[in-house]
Amino acid sequence: MLQLPRSVLIVLLFTLSACSQNSIASPEATIPTPWFAGTETALAASNTTPIEEAARTATPLALPTLPPGTAVVFSPPPEGTFSPVLYGLKDNSSFLVVGGIKKDQGWLSSVQAAQFVGEKMNYDLFSSTGLIQVSGSVAEFGPSCGNHFINSSVVLPESMVGVASGWVTNKRVTTDVSTDDPAYIQAVAEWFQSQGNSPKEIRVTRILQVDMEGDGVNEVLISASYFTEKFAFLTETGDYSVVLMRKVIGNTVVTIPLVKDYYVSSVPEFEVSYPNIYTVAETMDLNGDGTLEVIVDVHHWEGWGAIVYRVDGQNVREVMRAIC
């Protein structure tokens, strides 16, 4: 593991910034491998269906070898039988293909979904504050990112999640709760204590309240992240980024992690780890079964993306992801 004095790392930051303004690291670039002790995500092979496992491990066919900017043109399935899942950032007009849903196959990976995107598909883009309808291009492979994108003429006013127009017919109301709410700060602190960890500080970044199962009882999704240094590629012991769900089971409120990264170093110095920062982006019923999926925004050093989680009772599993 690469260990550098703090002063050297600060100089390194400014050197890197000067050399890589507005660039995204190539997948082939050599990057120090981060070391995570106790880093976990909600994906578990034992909870993954054959369709989901096939989607997660799908071979990218020949698509990644296409020349830069080449459009992926396939015949789209009949209307109402397929939808990609898109994620776009504020002030952008291109959308990352996170994955998709096909009625006869279930969850699709980003590569699989890109095959079915038609040239003249229309999309509904959702956020917690509104809906935008746009038309998009065919999916194009971005070699610097290693994922597929759909371009449109609309510049997003905020980060949004997109699906085929009409795919989501009932968008449940979500409510943002103040991140200073002492009850939820205490809930996060108690969860860390139950894991045997005591972070330096509980820093909640977003709290979203929504009825996930349509049973009239709200669940609460809590994003919390804390990093001692703010350089986006350094971590030290006690740094973390998590998304937790507070849910009523019987007569008890339980806290269930969707994704959790907690950093533990072998020595009390900063490490070059390029950590992910997770924040709840949106909740939507993507497969039409009445239960909402959770879309989590992912940001890291010069990169971004999204992960989609499915919740069944207390069981959580990742069903799609795309990260640059």
Image (cartoon, rainbow, N blue to C red):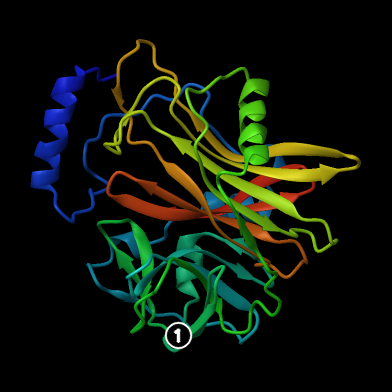
Residue at figure coordinates x 37%, y 69% from the top left: 149
Please identify the residue farthest to the top as the structure is shown: 267
243 relative position to 299: left or right = right
- Name the amino acid type tagged 1: Val
Residue 282, given in percent of the width and then of the height, sits at 57, 61
Q: Residue at x 39, y 16 (%)?
A: 265
User: Image quarter for residue 7?
Assistant: top left
Q: Nearer the viewer, residue 315 or 193?
A: 193
Indicate whether 230 appears above or below 316: above
Taking 202 as reference, is 28 above or below it? Answer: below
Q: Residue 2, image x and y in percent? A: 25, 20
Of residues 26 and 207, the one nearer the viewer is 207
Placement of the N terminus among the 4 image quadrants:
top left
Give neighbour class at mark 1: few <14, some 14-19, many 20+ (Cα, 10 Å). some
In the image as oriented, which residue stretches furthest toward the right? 250
Residue 263 in percent (x, y) is at 44, 25
Number of marks present in the image shown: 1
The residue positioned 58% from the left and 82% from the top of the image is: 77
Q: Kindly tell me whether residue 323 is visible in this rendering.
A: no
Q: Name the residue tied to disc 1.
A: 134
Q: Is residue 204 visible?
A: yes
Residue 254 percent coordinates (x, y):
77, 37
**What element does badge 1 sit on?**
strand
Q: With respect to residue 79, does 168 lie above or below?
A: above
| Between 184 and 125, the one nearer to me in the picture | 184
Which residue is found at the position 23% from the left and 67% from the top? 67
